[in-house]
């Protein structure tokens, strides 16, 4: 049974990139917090927020660096991944929180003002490989 989860919302702050040690290996992780809203039609061709919730999101690996570089406060995103219950102890007190370990993060294109793609880089075997995109968004 899968615990796949998809959420849409706005980032509360610019994502933070850090390096952590997991099983003796240094790994990069980007952590972010988003507000998952629940818009419903208001009857006047608009929408109103029916209430939502805050969600902590993490993105691991090479994509963590890309997410930290491209995403910023206020960006509207869709995240898909696995819900994970994290527990820890600090100063003798136990803490726990539910977070989404993201497999995919997608920008809402309705809020994107422009996209600039870097030039492809030439591989040693003559093939071209695309670099990641730089994206500017309107807030």
Image (spheres, rainbow, N blue to C red):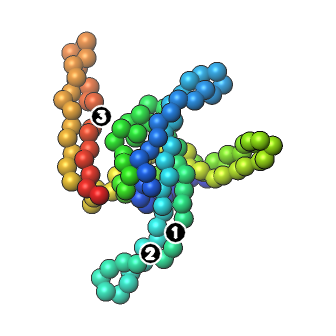
Compared to 14, does 62 lie above or below?
A: above
Does residue 107 appear left or right of residue 138 in this picture?
A: right
Q: Is residue 129 visible?
A: yes
Choose top left, top right, bottom left or bottom right for residue 124.
top left
Residue nearest the observer in this picture, 119 or 13 = 13
Q: Using the numbered discs, state the Cα–Cα distance from disc 3 to disc 2 in whole angstroms.
A: 34 Å
Mark 3 highlights which residue? 132
Of the two numbered discs 3 and 2 in the rendering, the one whose residue sits closer to the viewer: 2
Name the spot of residue 73 as percent of width and height, x first: 38, 52
- Mark 2: secondary structure: strand
**Labels 3 and 2: the sequence-earlier one:** 2
C-beta proximity under 8 Å, tags 1 and 2:
yes
Residue 116, placed above or below residue 8: above
- Quarter of the image for residue 44 reads bottom left
Mark 3 surroundings: few (<14), some (14-19) or many (≥20) residues within 10 A: few
Q: Kindly report the distance in space between the C-alpha atoms of the residues bearing marks 3 and 1.
A: 32 Å
């Amino acid at each position: 049974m899968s615990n796949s989860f998809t959420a849409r919302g706005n980032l509360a702050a610019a994502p933070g990139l850090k390096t952590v040690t997991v099983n003796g290996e240094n790994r990069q992780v980007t952590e972010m917090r988003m507000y998952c809203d629940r818009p419903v039609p208001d009857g006047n061709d608009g929408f109103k927020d029916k209430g939502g919730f805050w969600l902590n999101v993490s993105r691991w690996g090479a994509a963590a660096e890309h997410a930290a570089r491209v995403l910023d406060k206020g960006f509207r995103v869709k995240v898909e991944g696995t819900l994970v219950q994290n527990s820890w102890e600090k100063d003798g007190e136990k803490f726990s929180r539910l977070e989404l370990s993201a497999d995919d993060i997608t920008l809402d294109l309705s809020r994107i003002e422009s996209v600039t793609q870097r030039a492809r880089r030439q591989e040693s075997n003559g093939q071209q490989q695309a670099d990641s995109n730089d994206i500017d968004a309107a807030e």
